[in-house]
Image (cartoon, rainbow, N blue to C red):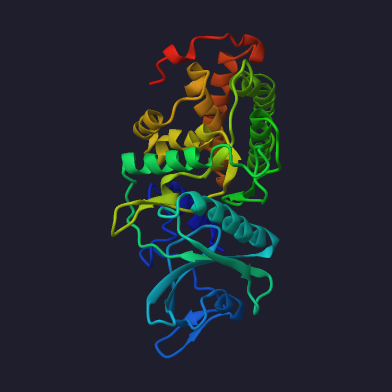
Amino acid sequence: MALLASIVFLLQSSKSDSRYLGAKRIDMPKPSMEHSSSSEVEIDENVLAKLPDGVKVLSIQPSGASAWVQTVRIDSRLADGTLKTYFKKGARGERGRQMMRGTFESETTLHSFAPHNVPKPLAWGTYKDEPDSHFYMCDFFDLTDDLPDISKFCAVVAKIHLDSMGKAPTGQFGFPFTTHLAYVDNDNSWSDSWEEWYAKALRRMLVAEEKSHGPDEELKILTNAIFDKVIPRLLRPLETGGRQIKPCLVHSDLWPGNVKPDAETDEPIIFDSCAFWGHNEADLGSWRAPRYRMGSPYMTEYRRIMRVSPPAEDWDDRNALYALRYDLLHSALFPNEPKFRRAAMDEMKRLVSKHPEGYDGFTEQHSGDVDVD
């Protein structure tokens, strides 16, 4: 696994971690059980078993960089002579096993709604030669390190949301497998209401953040107010007064490191999801942070395609509430950097001061007449 210095570089950099980008920026070692040479390629038996019958592995090379997993590309020749490249990542321990399975299940579901924009998952499993290590494999794409085209990217995200809306397997909010935002495992257990599910998800991130930075009395007070006042005020109106949310598939980690243009076609390729069935607007939470260079232009284009959920006057504060989950994650990843906690607390203070009465302060408005820009 990567050292802390690698984590700091990857997460502070405005560039992606380029996990699917080929050997363009490498700081991860090749997995110990596999290596490539000019005369021989060794590959774990269980990995080979997941590849198509008759495949010949030509080379295995480190590919991209990640703070959490080992990443390689596998160049191969199929039985019919076609050259084919796969991407593989791996991680150790029970957390690693959950990560690889969660990635496979998440990406498989996402691929079913966007087969041209999500690398096709191949398999996940456990190494035979190292039973405490686990892997995930999918198709390899050569990507650029640019931000995705606004119109193309937002069209893909909106299509996923529209095509999947109302198709959650249980009709509820959640996901049937554990997924991870960075190293933080998500509580994806099913909930009947969006307010309930998002509260669980945010609480899990607050726990991770406190483990990283330690307890803080002011943060505790703000946290109580967020759950008692802000979440009911901003999320309950989505499902009351005749309004409802149909769960759709949410990628939930759409920062620039996980969406890149295809080097050949310029089409946006989306990967590393930690999907759940939820409110479509939650996918825009990570776009709010200036560090990700997306922000207003992407949100405006998305809203041009997708109708803002009523009450529309709550759009911006809902987005801030969804962004808070990612701000807390960012704080959790930097235990020696207090500025990220302060930034998250400042936003919590703003939301708490704006909505001191909680749901009791909600007043019906003609949402369709509200300008959300």
Q: Nearer the viewer, residue 11 or 137?
A: 137
Q: Nearer the viewer, residue 256 or 365?
A: 365
Percent of width and height locating residue 344: 55, 31
Percent of width and height locating residue 156: 40, 44
Q: Quadrant of residue 372?
A: top left
Let me know if residue 160 appears in the view: yes
Residue at the spot x=62%, y=55% of the render? 102
> Where the C terminus falls, by quadrant?
top left
Let me know if residue 335 appears in the view: no
> Where the N terminus falls, by quadrant?
bottom right
Residue at the spot x=61%, y=24% of the render? 235
Residue at the spot x=63%, y=23% of the render? 239
Residue at the spot x=38%, y=39% of the render? 154
Name the side, left or right, on which 252 lies relative to 19: right
Please tell me how many numbered marks the rendered image carries.
Answer: 0
Q: Is residue 80 above or below residue 191?
A: below
Percent of width and height locating residue 368: 45, 15
Q: Is residue 135 above or below residue 334?
A: below
Name the side, left or right, on which 235 lies relative to 144: right
Q: Quadrant of residue 263?
A: bottom left
Q: Nearer the viewer, residue 274 or 328?
A: 274
The single residue placed furthest to the bottom in the displayed view is 39
Q: Is residue 131 above or below residue 237?
A: below
Percent of width and height locating residue 266: 29, 53
Name the side, left or right, on which 230 lies relative to 27: right
